C-alpha cells in the first residue's frame, strides 16, 4: 500500500486504537510538544504511569520495526540496490526508539497537562482486565500484519464479514467512527507526506522552483488514494485485533472511547504520534534526497 509521489506508505500512519490507531491527526502542519510557556512538558507521575500501562515502549518497538521495513521499501522505490549498509544505518538512526519515546512522552504530557481526573479514568480503564486485553490484542495484530500473507488473510476475513452485513461488522465500523480513525489517519498520512516533501526539498532532490504551496497541492492530490488505502487497512486490522473480544467487550471498549476522557485521549494520542512521525518523515525525505544525489549519508 503506497501513496503517490514521494509520500510515506499509508500503513506507517496507522496503528491500533489504544496502541495508537489514533496516531497522526490535525492540520497538515508540523506540531511541537510544548506547553503554554513554550518549554517541553515532562510527564507527571500519573501521565508517566498511563504511558507505561498502555505499553507504549512496545508500541514504539513495533513502529520502529515497521520503519526499518519501510526504509527497505524506500530504497527499492527510489534508488534500487544503491542504498546498502549505509542507507540501512541511516534509517536505523532516524527510527531511534529512545528519541521516538521522548517525543511521544513530551507531546502526550502537553496534551494531558491539567487533566488529572480524565487521566485517572484513562488509567482505570486500561489497567483493567479488559484494557490490558485490548492492548495485548492490538500489539499482537499489529505485529502479525507485518507478514504479507497474514495481511491478505485479514483483508479477506473482513471482506467476508462486511459482505454478510452482520452486526459484528457494524460494531467494528462503529468503533472506527467513534475514534475518528479514518479521517484522522488520512490527515496524519498527509502530514507525513508533506514533511517528506519538505525533507526532499531540503536535501536538494526537488526542483528549486517548487514552492511550499506546490508541495501542499501535491500532497492534497493524494487524499482520495490515501483514504481508500486507509479504509482498506483499518477495518481488516480492527477485525483481526478484536476478533478475540466478545460483542460485549467490544461494545465496552467503544463506550469508553465515546466518553469525554476517551475522546481526550484519542486526540492526545494522535498529537503525540504526530510529534514522533512528522520529524521522522522529514528526516527520511532529506536522507533519501542525499542518497539520490550520490552523497554519503
Image (cartoon, helix red, strand yellow):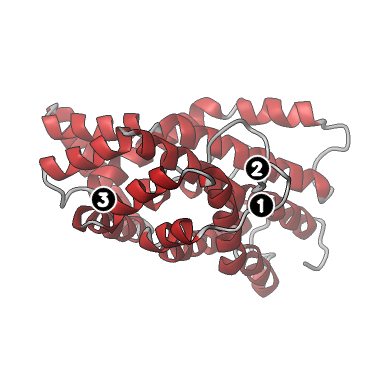
- 180 left or right, relative to 7: left
Question: Who comes first in sequence, dot 3 or dot 1?
Answer: 1
Residue 78 marker: 1
Is mark 1 in CB contact (under 8 Å) with mark 2?
yes
From mark 3 to mark 2, how far is it between C-alphas? Answer: 30 Å
Residue receiving disc 2: 6
Quadrant in which the C terminus is drawn: bottom right
Residue depicted at x 18% and y 37%: 251
Question: Who comes first in sequence, dot 1 or dot 2?
Answer: 2
Quadrant of the image occupied by residue 284:
bottom right
Q: Is residue 198 above or below residue 69?
A: above
Foreground disc of the pair 3, 1: 3
From mark 1 to mark 2, how far is it between C-alphas? Answer: 9 Å
Which is more toward the observer, 198 or 163? Answer: 198
Quadrant of the image occupied by residue 129:
bottom left
Provide residue 264's location: percent of width, then percent of height: 43, 38
Which is more toward the observer, 5 or 51? Answer: 51
Question: Who comes first in sequence, dot 3 or dot 2?
Answer: 2
Residue receiving disc 3: 241
Q: Is residue 227 visible?
A: yes
Label 3, secondary structure: give it: helix
Quadrant of the image occupied by residue 189:
top right
Foreground disc of the pair 1, 2: 2
- 263 left or right, relative to 35: left
- 290 left or right, relative to 278: right
For disc 3, the neighbor class at 10 Å (few under 14, some 14 to 19, many from 20) is: many
Residue depicted at x 66% and y 74%: 85
From mark 3 to mark 1, how far is it between C-alphas? Answer: 33 Å
Amino acid at each position: 500500500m503506497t501513496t503517490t509521489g514521494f509520500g510515506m506508505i499509508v500503513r506507517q500512519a496507522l496503528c491500533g486504537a489504544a496502541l495508537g490507531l489514533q496516531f497522526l491527526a490535525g492540520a497538515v502542519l508540523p506540531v511541537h510538544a510544548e506547553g503554554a510557556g513554550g518549554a517541553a512538558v515532562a510527564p507527571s507521575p500519573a501521565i508517566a504511569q498511563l504511558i507505561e500501562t498502555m505499553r507504549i515502549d512496545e508500541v514504539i518497538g513495533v513502529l520502529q520495526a515497521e520503519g526499518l521495513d519501510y526504509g527497505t521499501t524506500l530504497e527499492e522505490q527510489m534508488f534500487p540496490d544503491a542504498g546498502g549498509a549505509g542507507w540501512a544505518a541511516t534509517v536505523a538512526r532516524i527510527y531511534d526508539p529512545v528519541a521516538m519515546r521522548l517525543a511521544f512522552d513530551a507531546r502526550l504530557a502537553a496534551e494531558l497537562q491539567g487533566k488529572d481526573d480524565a487521566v485517572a479514568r484513562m488509567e482505570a480503564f486500561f489497567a483493567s482486565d479488559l484494557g490490558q486485553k485490548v492492548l495485548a490484542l492490538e500489539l499482537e495484530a499489529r505485529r502479525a500484519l507485518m507478514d504479507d500473507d497474514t495481511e491478505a488473510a485479514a483483508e479477506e476475513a473482513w471482506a467476508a464479514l462486511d459482505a454478510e452485513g452482520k452486526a459484528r461488522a457494524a460494531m467494528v465500523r462503529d468503533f472506527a467512527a467513534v475514534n475518528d480513525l479514518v479521517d484522522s489517519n488520512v490527515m496524519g498520512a498527509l502530514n507525513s507526506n508533506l514533511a517528506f516533501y519538505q525533507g526532499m526539498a531540503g536535501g536538494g532532490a526537488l526542483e528549486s522552483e517548487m514552492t511550499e504551496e506546490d508541495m501542499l497541492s501535491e500532497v492534497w492530490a493524494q487524499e482520495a488514494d490515501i483514504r481508500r488505502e486507509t479504509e482498506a487497512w483499518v477495518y481488516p486490522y480492527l477485525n483481526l485485533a478484536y476478533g478475540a473480544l466478545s460483542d460485549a467487550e467490544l461494545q465496552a471498549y467503544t463506550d469508553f472511547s465515546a466518553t469525554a476522557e476517551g475522546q481526550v485521549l484519542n486526540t492526545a494520542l494522535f498529537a503525540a504520534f504526530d510529534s514522533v512521525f512528522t520529524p521522522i518523515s522529514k528526516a527520511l525525505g532529506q536522507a533519501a534526497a542525499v542518497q539520490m544525489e550520490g552523497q554519503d549519508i
